[in-house]
Image (cartoon, rainbow, N blue to C red):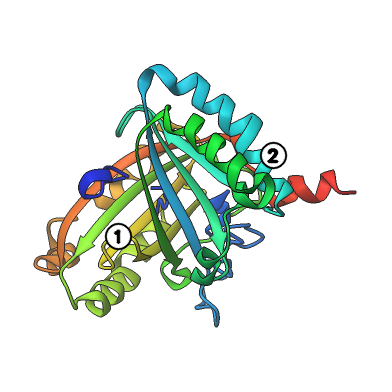
């Protein structure tokens, strides 16, 4: 995910279409991923909060330590159970981190965040002052998972890499794009070697005509195994997207397990 306007990135991602939120975007604790876990529409679409942060290069180590030793413990103490952190892996904007967390409802934003809940207003101000020194920019938006346009994870293993595509379509062309994707793109993707493909759409905080698609793979070598899926993107069925797709960009992100919380690990710790 690159900068969206001033902060075009995801991870959501993974998404990021930027993923564990990917595995949080599908059971996005997969257990068959996001309700997404079956490739059938969910009665209650799963939503996620995605935050892209650009860290000052000289503050990367301090930022990761702050995230690991302060942010995650506070999040867990406030009752949080799932948090996925991704960072750019060679291809994309350097020093970019993407955090994906499940979101039950946007009404959650009416409540104090996890830092305020645990530290109180005064403690939160001190925490924020320390955190601000490390970052260059931050952008938060919400996405809705689209299980009918996704391929669930084959295993419950933690993800490793995600290739994230952000696709912007022309206004009022959602139905055409989604029907084309389901008819032509998904069958091609199923023939390739990847752990999963997760699709979501931005709902609030960004372009509501932007989709985030995320391929989960084990390595850069694995990426080459499905590139053939895009070989004829400019001809045949792909040509029908002319005028519907107005922009597409990609980046690669690496899942950071030591800066994440997976539901499985939480359950094991509570036994």
Kindly identify the residue that appears in the image at 57 percent across and 69 percent down: 104
Taking 83 as reference, is 88 left or right? Answer: left
Q: Residue furthest top?
A: 58
Residue 242 lies, with reference to residue 247, above or below; the image says below
User: What residue does disc 1 label?
Assistant: 206
Taking 43 as reference, is 180 left or right? Answer: left
Would residue 231 be seen by someone viewing this image from the given angle?
Answer: no
Kindly identify the residue that appears in the image at 80 percent across and 51 percent down: 267
User: What residue does disc 2 label?
Assistant: 73
Find out whether the residues at labels 2 and 1 contact each other: C-beta distance under 8 Å. no
Would residue 145 be seen by someone viewing this image from the given angle?
Answer: yes
Mark 2 neighbour class, 10 Å CA radius: few under 14, some 14 to 19, many 20 or more: some
Residue 67, given in percent of the width and then of the height, sits at 57, 33
Residue 52 lies, with reference to residue 108, above or below; the image says above
Quadrant of the rendered image containing residue 3: top left
Q: Nearer the viewer, residue 232 or 247?
A: 247
Q: Nearer the viewer, residue 154 or 21?
A: 21
Residue 179, given in percent of the width and then of the height, sits at 29, 77
Q: Secondary structure at mark 2?
A: helix
**Which of the image's four quarters has the N terminus?**
top left
Q: Residue furthest front?
A: 122
Q: Nearer the viewer, residue 89 or 67?
A: 67
Q: Nearer the viewer, mark 2 or mark 1?
A: 2
Mark 1 neighbour class, 10 Å CA radius: few under 14, some 14 to 19, many 20 or more: some
Taking 143 as reference, is 28 left or right? Answer: right
If you read the primary sequence from the N terminus, does the residue marked by circle 2 or circle 1 appear first? 2
Q: For the residues marked 2 and 1, what is the alpha-carbon distance in whole angstroms?
A: 29 Å
Residue 257, given in percent of the width and then of the height, sits at 61, 35
């Amino acid at each position: 995910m690159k900068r969206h306007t001033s902060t075009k990135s995801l991870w959501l991602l993974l998404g990021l279409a930027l993923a564990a939120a990917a595995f949080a975007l599908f059971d996005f604790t997969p257990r068959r991923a996001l309700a997404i876990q079956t490739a059938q529409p969910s009665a209650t679409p799963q939503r996620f909060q995605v935050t892209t942060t650009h860290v000052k290069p000289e503050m990367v180590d301090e930022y990761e330590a702050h995230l690991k030793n302060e942010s995650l413990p506070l999040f867990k103490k406030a009752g949080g159970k799932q948090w996925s952190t991704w960072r750019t892996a060679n291809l994309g904007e350097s020093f970019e981190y993407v955090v994906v967390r499940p979101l039950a409802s946007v009404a959650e934003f009416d409540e104090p965040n996890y830092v305020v809940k645990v530290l109180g207003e005064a403690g939160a101000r001190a925490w924020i002052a320390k955190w601000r020194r490390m970052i260059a920019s931050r952008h938060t938006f919400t996405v809705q998972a689209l299980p009918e346009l996704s391929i669930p994870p084959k295993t419950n293993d933690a993800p490793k890499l995600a290739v994230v595509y952000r696709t912007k379509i022309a206004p009022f062309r959602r139905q055409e794009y989604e029907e084309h994707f389901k008819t032509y793109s998904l069958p091609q993707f199923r023939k390739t070697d990847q752990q999963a493909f997760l699709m979501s759409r931005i709902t609030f905080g960004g372009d509501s005509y932007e989709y985030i698609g995320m391929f989960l793979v084990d390595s850069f070598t694995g990426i080459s195994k499905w590139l053939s899926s895009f070989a004829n993107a400019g001809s045949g069925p792909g040509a029908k997207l002319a005028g519907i797709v107005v922009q597409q960009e990609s980046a690669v992100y690496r899942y950071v397990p030591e800066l994440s919380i997976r539901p499985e690990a939480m359950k094991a710790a509570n036994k």
